[in-house]
Image (cartoon, helix red, strand yellow):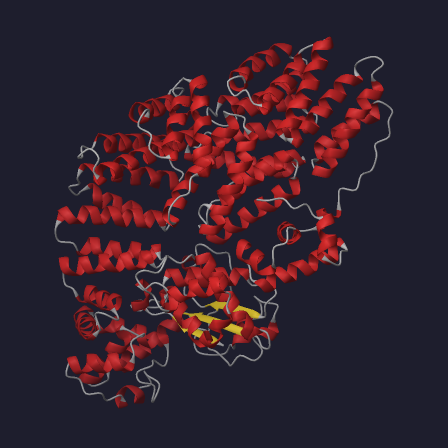
Amino acid sequence: MIRVHGTPPDRNVAFAGLRRVCAPLLTRFGDLPQAQRDVLQHVIEPAANNPTPNPVHLGLAVLTLLTPRAASDAVLVLVENAEEVDDASLHVIALAACSVLAEPITIAFAVHEPAGAFPFLDLPQVQTDSDTGAASVGQLLEPLFARTEAIASARPWVPEQLVRNDTRPESPCLNRVWEQYALRWETLPTAARMLVLLASTDQAATPALLRRAAAELDLPWDLGPAEAAGLVIPNSELRFAHPLAASAVYARAGPRHRRTAHAALSRVSEPSQDADHRTWHAACAATGPDEEIAAALEESAERARRRGDPGGAARLLTHATAMTPDSFRRGPRALAAAEAHLSANALDEAAGLIAVATTCRLEDTEQARLARVRARALLALRSAPEAAALLLVHAAEQLAAVEAAPGSAMAATVQSAARQTYLEALSATALAGRVQGQGGAHAVAASARHHVVGRTVTPTDLLLEGLSTLLADFPHDGVGAVRRALAPFAAETPLGDDATSRWLMLAPLAQQTFVHHLWDFAAWARLSSRATRLARVVGDLSILPAELMCSAGAHLHRGKVATAAALVAEADSISAATGAAPYTDAALILAAWRGEEAHVLRMLDEGRDGGMLHGEISLRGVGGYASGVLYNGLSRFDLAMDATRDGFEYDQFNFTGWSLAEHVEAAARVGDRAAATASLRQLAEHTRPAGTAWAHGIQARCEALVAGGRQAEEKFQQARHDLSRAGIEIQVARTHLLYGEWLLQRPGRSTDAEDELLTAHRDFTAMHAHAFAARAGRALTSSGRAVPSYDAGSVAALTPQELQIAQRAARGLTSEAIAAELFLSVQTVEFHLQQVYAKLHVHDLLHLREVVPTDDD
């Protein structure tokens, strides 16, 4: 068993808890793959020049480190007092826990408030009111884990309701225990009380450090009274008998004595070896603002950030802000703390620090940063994106107006920040939809265009110039400008993880543009594949789900519905594991194409209510398009006609063209030729400037639906050809269906109609687009032709994760490579592969390659 105990001093020291988990396993360190060894090296031996560790890669390395121990025996990792373990360690250990599948490993956390301690995980929980002793590890964990063998050999452990070091427990039973420890401490001699207080102040302190602190306060090293009172374990060098004892001592001591203890511990800590602990104690000992301590806290925050602990950095910056006596310095620190809390997704804390920064004097660039942070907070809260867009435009204009020496590093930095902020403003505008009115996007784009056109420096600048031109009422010029930006942006190689993350944040906006304005499927597929690969390499779980959803959309249009479903499932699992709001667009569209009405309606109810509540009117756009696909597939064309209006009335950036195409089909099927013709004219405004095979194909198919005679047939054939050339197989199948239905109404064309409908039925069945397959089947039945039965493929028996692993194995990736790419352990990958082989009835890799499609991301 590996036992880790969280303590308050470690709360702000990145990876302090993780180092304790790894310490008993260092003899196995050399067995790790080199990449995992490198990432763990940063945690075990931190150095300033080490790269920022990735929590996902760290979690996988920790799981691999635990697994060899588990080959012959079970492993139990207990993280006690988890509320006091640093966030960086908690995140990594919890990610490792979520990845356990086939390994005989159990990772458990003991916390006072489970929901508060783990906002990013949905782990199984057991609550207990036991105070001292009836339950063993097995009794506590058995309801949670089926692997009883993983805990059978573990020694007994007392479950505890763990509390913060200065807080009484709420449970009456535990409160009595807490009070008893406090009374025992009060009966000790004065010197013994102070000695025990030192230990409660820093439970992670070594005996040597405590001895130095005792000497600093002229205290004799006499543990006898504390041992006799049952406060500390005999011969343990001040190890408390129970965490409640430490809590009671620290709380009962009072502020003045606590500050004395903190000050002593700060003075005797080694500045070169333990700077963060030294600073933490100094801050706790302070009686008021202190610039020296504030600066030291700021340095500790920077070390936490470099070590990959944004939450720890945010807290330290918050303390630094509070400790800053000078309001001129307090403002920038509050602003930095707010930005750090936003990065750590701590929105309430960010809002409080934004309020602090607002009251301080800030320079022009800092005022712009403040507006940008305010806007990001609104977007993160999903509150008033229209206000966020205006704030971002204001911030961008402030940055663009900053005067700096031409050609200087400052000028380049400020102008780059301005352009980045304009892109964020355009994203916010797209999110807000028409809640800003008809001129919302135009106003943002016009402002951006005024400042950036002709001043492009990077591929990202080209993208901004193209987008601003496109949305500033210059659709023809804008299409060309965006197309010129495509290749440089798609090929851009950001330097460093931070730059890559910024690039990835813009990738979804770029793809939306290439898809909905350029109708460029090849660009979408290429960019989504690259963005997904980069997101996996960076391992940023706040970005990866969005990229996975973009890839899912591209695969869906290719007709690879099973692959799309696997990517959606992966994105959903990551969002659930991190506590982030799920990305629903691709999942909603996938369910609509599959004809899953109940699922679509449930998602629409949840999404629309939430979207309208928070101002995200553009959610009605994707909802309108998805409803149109669903009801057109189910042949309920009146409902499709009504639903698709949302797609082009409430979404001025993304789903307008797609929704218009669905509306043309629905209106044509209900016999409303005027409505179909009006939507067709609007659709042409979107497709003609693009000039791609995809745009031509959709336009031609819609023209066929409102045309007659020979012209209609020519348009259907043109659509089929153009969409096939574009590689959009699901729309090719849709065109076969519509063409076949049209041919059924032509005298003497039943054989041709059946050929088209048979192709549509076969392809939709293979794609699991059940509603459209059934629609093709009904048309065949009406013609007197029997509907054939197709085997949808044994791959359908695989779970989404099994399919992803099988696809990579079929491409020739090793288990180690698959594990690294999907953030799993090698043993989990091999477990899934065994299931794949059994379900598909294959016995070797060669046979697997014949059965499983080898799609890229």
Q: Along the line of sight, which residue is nearer the eye, 6 or 413?
A: 413
Above or below for 211 versus 33: below
- Report which quarter residue 411 is drawn in: top left
The residue drawn where x is 40% and y is 26% is 466
Residue 327: x and y in percent read 14, 48
One can see residue 397 in this view:
yes
- Check the image and report above or below for 778 versus 54: above
User: Which quadrant would residue 430 be assigned to in this image?
Assistant: top left
| Residue 491 picture location, percent across and down | 45, 38
Q: Quadrant of the C terminus?
A: top right
Q: Is residue 656 above or below residue 263?
A: above
Of 267 and 626, the residue lying toward us: 267
321 relative position to 438: left or right? left
Where does the image place residue 362, in percent across and percent down from the top left? 17, 41
Q: List x then y, in percent, for residue 611.
A: 46, 34
Residue at the image position 73 percent from the left and 9 percent from the top: 709
Of 42 and 845, the residue lying toward us: 845
Q: Could you tell me which residue is drawn at 27 percent across and 47 percent down?
A: 352
